[in-house]
Amino acid sequence: MSAAPILQVEDIAVTYSQLIPALRGVSLTVPSGSIVALLGGNGAGKTTTLKAVSNLIRAERGELTAGRIVYRGDATTDVEPWTLAERGLVQVLEGRRCFARLSVEDNLRLGAFVRRPDRADLEADLERIYRIFPRLKERRKTLAGYASGGEQQMVAIGRALMARPSLVLLDEPSMGLAPQVVEEIFETVAALNRDDGVSFLLAEQNAAITLRYAQFGYVLEGGRVVGKGNAQTLLQLDTLRDAYLGSGKAGIDGRTRKSHRSRGQREHRKLTGTAFR
């Protein structure tokens, strides 16, 4: 993690409706040109963290009540989401959020709006997306609502790429997709990072595949960072997967995920080194 950070999240707290605490003391760093994983189960605070970074949290009556977020050296507290997108910080929302009654290609074109490109640039960018996702070229006239889940995820990522981002906040890209499609999505993320230098902050429950592609990871639970470390280190911690990433299941002795979680938390307290504080 020696590269200069493109994003720094410094001890932030988020509250919804001035009443409900969602994040407490969350800090993380995304070095420029890296893929950083943000891991945890449902309700851990992953989506809230991403929306705090993109300033979309305010659309849901959320408020940053402590700490600060710095993108490319500048604090983002009072910056509108569309201005951040103009500056290269783009979020792909959980659930893909395609415009169902627009064609695949029209969905993609909307992603370029913040740049106000001329026709030639727009067409060149569309062809780039079609090279990345050849399936979308075949389906470009299809209404997005009739596209498969995997195709809609490609549309959502392609739409973000039309803004020519430097940093993409990618929320649960594997949700509801077949394993083969998930693999394809992650391979595309890796290629964009390797070949184009796009940085990613990638929120996921699927730790196994995410940590294969990320360089570093943070684990959230209950709105706090409870673990962090090199991706390969985190992959080897079975107790982490059981305690925080939902891989524990009921076994032949009838123990439930909750019992795995309790055992994992006990082991968590024993761990030292870079993975946990």
Image (tube, grey):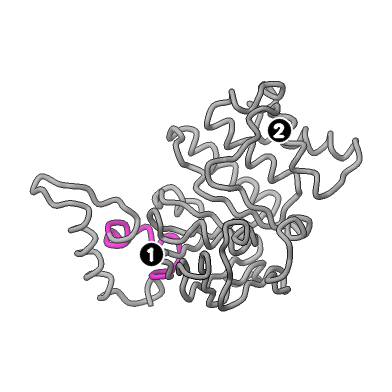
What secondary structure is marked by label 2? helix
- Gap between marks 2 and 1 measured at Cα: 38 Å
Residue plotted at (24% across, 64% down): 264
Q: Callout 1, which amino acid?
A: Glu
Position of residue 127 in the picture relative to residue 268 (left or right)? right
Q: Quadrant of residue 142?
A: top right
* Residue 230 counted in the magenta span: yes
Residue plotted at (75% across, 55% down): 82
- Report the residue marked by disc 2: 131
Q: How many marks?
A: 2
Position of residue 269 in the picture relative to residue 114 (left or right)? left
Image spot of residue 229 (x, y percent): 44, 68
Task: Answer above or below: position of 169 versus 148.
Answer: below
The range drawn in magenta is 225-242
In front: 120, or 132? 120
Image spot of residue 137 (x, y percent): 70, 25
Image spot of residue 9 (x, y percent): 58, 72
Residue plotted at (69% across, 69% down): 76
In front: 32, or 78? 78
Q: Quadrant of residue 85?
A: bottom right
Residue at the farthest left position: 253
- Report the residue marked by disc 1: 221
* Quarter that holds the N terminus: bottom right
Image spot of residue 119 (x, y percent): 90, 36
Position of residue 115 in the picture relative to residue 61 (left or right)? right
Position of residue 118 in the picture relative to residue 13 (left or right)? right
The answer to which of marks 2 and 1 sits earlier in the sequence is 2
Nearest to the eye among marks 2 and 1: give it.
Answer: 1
In front: 124, or 194? 124
Q: Quadrant of residue 98?
A: top right
Residue plotted at (21% across, 64% down): 262
- Residue 162: give its label: none
